[in-house]
C-alpha cells in the first residue's frame, strides 16, 4: 500500500526527475548505450529512454486508473439497477452483458479501438467498453442477495424511495467486492493499454508511452536492447506493484474470504470459531 | 501448478514439432554441382504481367523479360529486341527482335507472338494502355511495328515497365491459371505455385542468354520483416528482400552475410500546402526546408540507407544533378530562426512560439507509416519547435485523402520518381496545375509550359534540360522539399552471386543467380 502510494507520487513528480526532454529528437546522439547523460541510453531518434519511461509513467498509470474507475462506475451502476429492478429490465441488461462477455476482451477492445481510430482517449474508451460487464455481473449478484435482507425490507417499509435505497443502502454494501476486483484488475489494464499502444492504437507519437516505446525499439532489439528492456521492466514492475496492492486491498476489505479468515484471526491472536 | 507445467510442456512440444518442419535445402550438394537457391521476399505476388502490378514479380523472379530494359543508369537498352527505328512522323516504331528467343513451352518468340502478347496486355491493363498509347501493331517475321495514336516519346520506357513482359498469349487458354503459371522467356519457369506461400522454379534449358546457374529457385513468401531477418539468420533462405532498415548493420557486421545496396529513385519529400495561411509565405517554407537535417535523416533514421538530395531524381541521372539545384538551402537551424525573425515573425508573448501579424504560427504535419517517414516527421517536428513554430503531428495509414482535402500544412511523403526511367510523369503529377498528385496546389504557368514541352520532346538531352529547369523552379522558392533517396538493400548469405540490385527495383533473379 505504502509502496503504491509512493509510486503514484513518483509518477506525478516524474517530470522533476527527468534528466532530458523526453520529446527532444537529437539525431547525433541516437542509439547511445546507457551513459552519464542518458542513464538508460537513447532510442533510435536520440531521445532519452530514462526520461521517456518517466514521462510514460503518468500516462500509463493514470490512464489505467481512469479505465478502471470508468468501468467500475458504469458496471456497478448497471449491475445494481438490474439487480434491484429485476424482471424485464434485469434480463435485458444481463443479455447485453452476455453479449459483451461473449467476446474475448482484447479482441473486442481491438475492434472498438480500431473503429474509433487511434489515440490514447479512444484506447481508454475501448478498454472501458470491454471492462464494465464483469462489474455489472458482480454487483448484480450481491444486490440479488441484499434485496432479501431485513434492513432493505425495513427501509422499504419506512417509505424510502427506490433511488435512496439504491444509493444509501445497496451501493455501499456492494462496493467492497467490486473495489477488490477493481484493484486486482489495475495491472491487467496496464498490460492491455500497453498492448494497444504497442499495436499502434493507443498513445500516438511523439507522446511517450511504454507500449509504443517497445514497439518503436522492437526492430533494434537485437543490437540496442535497452530501448525495449527499460520500458518492458517498467511495465513489469508496475504490474507487480498493483497486483500486490490488489492483494492487500483484498486482505483489508474482504476478511470473510475463507482463505484469509484464518490468517486474519491468527494475526489478531484469536482462535477460529 | 500441474496445469501450468503441462501447458508449458505442450507448448515446448509444439514448438519442437514446428521446427521439425523446416525443409533442408541445398545442404547435400557437392562441389561443382548446381545448388538450389531460396529467396525470401516480404511481398510475394502473383505473376501474370498483364494483371495490375504482378509484372514486377514476373521479372523479379526471373520468369519473364521485356523487349527493352533499363540499365543501372536508367537508360533504355535492348533486351529481347535487337534494335529499333522510328518513322519520320514519330508515330511508327519498328522493333527488330532477337531470333533466338524461345518461350518456356518451346515456341519461338517471333513478331506475331510479341504482337499477341502486347495486344493481350493493353486489353487487360488500363495503365499499360494509357502509357503505351498503341494504335496498331503489325508483325512481319522478327519485326514488330507499333504505331501510336500520337507521338509518344516514352514508348520505349513504357515497354520496359514490368507489365510489358513478353508472354506466349496463346498459352493463356484457360487450361492453367496464367497468374501462377505464365509462359515467359526468362531463365526460370514456374513448376509449382502455392498462393501466398512459395513458387518453385526450375531452370529453362533453352534460355537464350545462357545456362541458368542454379538447380532450382524457390521464392518464399515471408511478409513479416522480423521473421524474414530470422529466416536469413538461421539459414532457411539464401537471400532476403524487403528487410527492415534496422537490421542493415546487423547483417553488414557479420562475415556470414553480404549486403548489396543501390540508390533507388524513391524520394522522401515534403509537400507544402500552398493554400494555407502560413504556408503561402516563401520565407516560412524556406525556414522549414532549412530545418530538415537531410544528412542525419538518411544516416540515422533509415540507418544509412539513404542519399540526401536537393533534386527529385537521384544524382546518377542526368536530370538529377544536385549542383544545378541552386537556391535550395542547406540544413541550418540558427539560420532558419534568423530568417523568420528578419521577416516579421516575433515572439511577443514570450511563450517560445513565433507569431506573424499577431497570429501564432501553428502548423499541421501529417505522414503515413512507410519506413523512415514517421521518424523523419517526428524529427522535423522537434526541429521546427526548436526554431519557434508550433507543430502538431498526425500519423495515418494512408494520407491521400487528407492531402486531397488540403487539411494539412506539411506532408512527409515517399514516392518512386522514375519507375520507367523518365522524369515527365512524376514532375507533371506533382507540379502540373490541377494534377492528381499536386497535393500542394502548386500552380505556375511557366512550369505548365515547360511540362507541355517535355511531354512531346523526343531529344534525350533536351528532356533532361527541361526536367532540370522544372525542378529548379519548384525548389527555388521552396514549394517542394526533397529530402533523400532511399537505397534498396538485400542481404544474402556470403557467396551468393548474380542477384541483381537495380535502381528500378524490379530486376532481381538473373541467369547467374546462385549460391556458392
Image (cartoon, coloured by chain):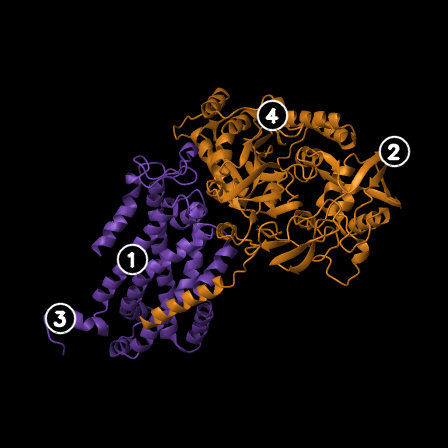
Percent position of residue A105, x then y: 43, 64
Identify the secondary structure beneath mark 2.
Answer: loop
State the CA–CA distance, disc 3 to disc 1: 27 Å
Residue extending furthest toward the right: B140
User: If you read the primary sequence from the N terminus, does the residue marked by circle 2 or circle 4 appear first?
Assistant: 2
The chain under label 2 reads B
Q: Dot 3, crowdedness within 10 Å: few (<14), some or many (≥20)?
A: few
Q: Is residue B354 left or right of residue A144?
A: right
State the CA–CA distance, disc 3 to disc 4: 83 Å
Would you say the residues marked 1 and 4 are in contact, meaning their CB atoms lie under 8 Å apart?
Answer: no
State the CA–CA distance, disc 2 to disc 4: 36 Å
> Who's the residue at 58% across and 32% down the image?
B482
Chain B, chosen colour in render: orange
Residue B408 showing in the rendered view: no
| Residue identifier under label 2 | B87
Mark 2 or 1, closer to the camera: 2
Mark 2 or 4, closer to the camera: 2
Residue extending furthest toward the left: A269
Q: Dot 1, crowdedness within 10 Å: few (<14), some or many (≥20)?
A: few
Identify the secondary structure beneath mark 4.
Answer: helix
| Residue identifier under label 1 | A240
Residue extending furthest toward the front: B31
Which chain, by letter, is purple? Answer: A
Residue A156 showing in the rendered view: yes
State the CA–CA distance, disc 1 to disc 4: 57 Å
> Who's the residue at 72% across and 39% down the image?
B69
Amino acid at each position: 500500500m505504502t509502496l503504491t502510494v509512493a509510486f503514484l507520487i513518483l509518477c506525478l513528480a516524474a517530470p522533476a526527475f527527468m534528466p532530458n526532454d523526453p520529446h527532444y529528437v537529437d539525431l547525433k546522439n541516437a542509439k547511445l548505450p546507457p551513459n552519464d547523460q542518458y542513464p538508460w541510453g537513447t532510442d533510435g531518434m536520440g531521445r532519452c529512454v530514462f526520461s521517456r519511461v518517466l514521462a510514460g509513467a503518468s500516462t500509463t498509470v493514470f490512464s489505467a486508473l481512469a479505465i478502471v474507475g470508468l468501468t467500475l462506475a458504469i458496471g456497478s451502476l448497471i449491475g445494481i439497477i438490474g439487480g434491484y429492478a429485476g424482471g424485464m429490465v434485469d434480463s435485458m441488461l444481463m443479455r447485453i452483458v452476455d453479449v459483451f462477455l461473449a467476446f474475448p476482451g482484447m479482441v473486442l477492445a481491438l475492434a472498438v479501438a480500431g473503429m474509433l481510430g487511434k489515440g490514447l482517449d479512444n484506447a481508454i474508451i475501448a478498454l472501458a467498453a470491454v471492462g464494465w460487464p464483469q462489474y455489472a455481473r458482480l454487483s448484480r449478484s450481491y444486490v440479488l442477495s441484499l434485496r432479501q435482507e431485513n434492513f432493505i425490507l425495513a427501509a422499504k417499509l419506512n417509505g424510502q424511495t427506490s433511488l435512496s435505497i439504491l444509493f444509501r443502502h445497496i451501493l455501499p454494501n456492494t462496493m467492497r467486492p467490486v473495489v477488490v476486483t477493481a484493484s486486482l484488475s489495475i495491472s491487467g489494464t496496464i498490460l492491455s493499454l500497453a498492448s494497444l499502444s504497442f499495436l499502434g492504437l493507443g498513445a500516438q507519437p511523439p507522446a511517450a508511452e511504454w507500449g509504443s516505446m517497445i514497439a518503436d525499439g522492437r526492430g533494434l532489439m537485437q543490437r540496442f536492447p535497452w530501448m525495449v528492456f527499460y520500458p518492458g521492466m517498467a511495465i513489469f514492475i508496475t504490474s507487480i506493484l498493483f497486483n500486490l496492492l490488489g492483494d492487500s486491498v483484498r486482505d483489508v476489505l474482504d476478511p470473510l474470504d475463507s482463505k484469509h479468515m484464518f490468517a486474519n484471526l491468527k494475526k489478531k491472536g484469536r482462535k477460529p470459531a | 501448478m500441474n496445469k501450468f507445467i503441462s501447458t508449458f510442456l505442450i507448448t515446448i512440444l509444439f514448438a519442437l514439432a514446428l521446427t521439425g518442419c523446416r525443409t533442408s535445402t541445398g545442404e547435400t550438394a557437392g562441389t561443382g554441382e548446381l545448388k538450389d537457391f531460396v529467396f525470401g521476399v516480404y511481398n510475394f505476388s502473383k505473376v501474370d504481367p498483364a494483371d495490375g502490378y504482378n509484372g514486377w514479380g514476373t521479372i523479379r523472379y526471373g520468369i519473364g523479360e521485356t523487349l527493352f530494359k533499363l540499365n543501372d543508369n536508367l537508360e533504355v537498352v535492348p533486351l529481347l529486341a535487337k534494335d529499333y527505328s522510328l518513322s519520320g512522323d514519330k508515330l511508327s516504331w519498328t522493333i527488330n527482335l532477337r531470333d533466338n528467343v524461345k518461350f518456356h513451352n518451346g515456341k519461338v518468340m517471333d513478331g506475331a507472338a510479341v504482337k499477341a502478347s502486347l495486344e493481350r496486355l493493353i486489353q487487360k491493363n488500363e495503365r499499360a494502355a494509357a502509357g503505351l498509347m498503341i494504335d496498331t501493331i503489325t508483325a512481319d517475321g522478327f519485326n514488330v511495328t507499333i504505331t501510336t495514336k500520337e507521338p509518344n516519346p516514352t514508348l520505349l520506357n513504357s515497354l520496359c515497365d514490368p507489365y510489358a513482359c513478353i508472354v506466349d498469349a496463346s498459352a493463356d487458354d484457360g487450361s492453367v491459371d496464367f497468374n501462377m503459371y505464365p509462359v515467359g522467356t526468362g531463365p526460370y519457369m514456374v513448376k509449382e505455385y502455392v498462393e501466398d506461400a512459395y513458387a518453385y522454379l526450375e531452370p529453362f534449358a533453352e534460355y537464350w542468354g545462357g545456362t541458368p546457374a542454379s538447380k532450382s529457385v524457390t521464392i518464399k513468401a515471408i511478409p513479416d520483416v522480423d521473421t524474414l531477418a530470422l529466416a536469413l539468420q538461421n539459414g532457411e533462405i539464401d537471400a532476403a528482400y524487403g528487410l527492415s532498415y534496422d537490421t542493415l548493420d546487423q547483417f553488414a557486421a557479420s562475415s556470414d552475410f553480404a549486403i548489396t545496396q543501390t540508390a533507388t529513385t524513391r524520394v522522401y519529400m515534403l509537400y507544402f500546402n500552398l493554400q494555407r495561411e502560413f504556408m503561402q509565405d516563401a520565407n516560412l517554407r524556406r525556414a522549414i526546408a532549412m530545418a530538415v537535417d537531410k544528412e542525419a535523416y538518411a544516416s540515422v533514421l533509415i540507418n544509412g540507407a539513404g542519399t540526401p538530395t536537393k533534386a527529385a531524381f537521384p544524382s546518377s541521372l542526368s536530370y538529377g544533378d544536385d549542383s544545378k539545384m541552386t537556391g535550395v538551402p542547406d540544413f541550418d537551424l540558427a539560420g532558419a530562426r534568423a530568417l523568420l525573425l528578419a521577416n516579421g515573425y516575433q515572439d511577443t508573448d514570450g511563450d517560445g512560439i513565433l507569431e506573424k501579424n499577431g497570429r501564432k504560427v501553428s502548423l499541421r504535419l501529417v505522414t503515413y507509416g512507410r519506413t523512415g517517414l514517421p521518424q523523419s516527421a517526428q524529427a522535423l517536428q522537434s526541429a521546427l519547435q526548436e526554431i519557434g513554430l508550433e507543430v502538431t503531428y498526425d500519423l495515418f495509414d494512408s494520407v491521400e485523402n487528407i492531402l486531397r482535402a488540403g487539411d494539412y500544412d506539411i506532408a512527409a511523403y515517399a514516392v518512386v520518381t522514375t519507375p520507367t526511367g523518365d522524369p515527365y510523369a512524376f514532375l507533371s503529377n506533382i507540379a502540373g496545375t490541377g494534377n492528381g498528385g499536386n497535393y500542394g496546389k502548386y500552380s505556375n504557368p511557366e512550369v505548365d509550359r515547360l511540362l507541355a514541352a517535355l511531354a512531346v520532346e523526343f531529344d534525350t538531352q533536351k528532356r533532361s534540360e527541361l526536367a532540370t529547369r522544372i525542378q529548379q523552379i519548384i525548389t527555388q522558392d521552396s514549394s517542394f522539399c526533397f529530402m533523400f533517396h532511399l537505397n534498396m538493400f538485400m542481404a544474402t548469405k556470403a557467396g551468393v552471386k548474380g542477384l541483381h540490385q537495380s535502381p528500378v527495383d524490379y530486376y532481381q533473379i538473373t541467369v547467374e543467380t546462385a549460391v556458392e
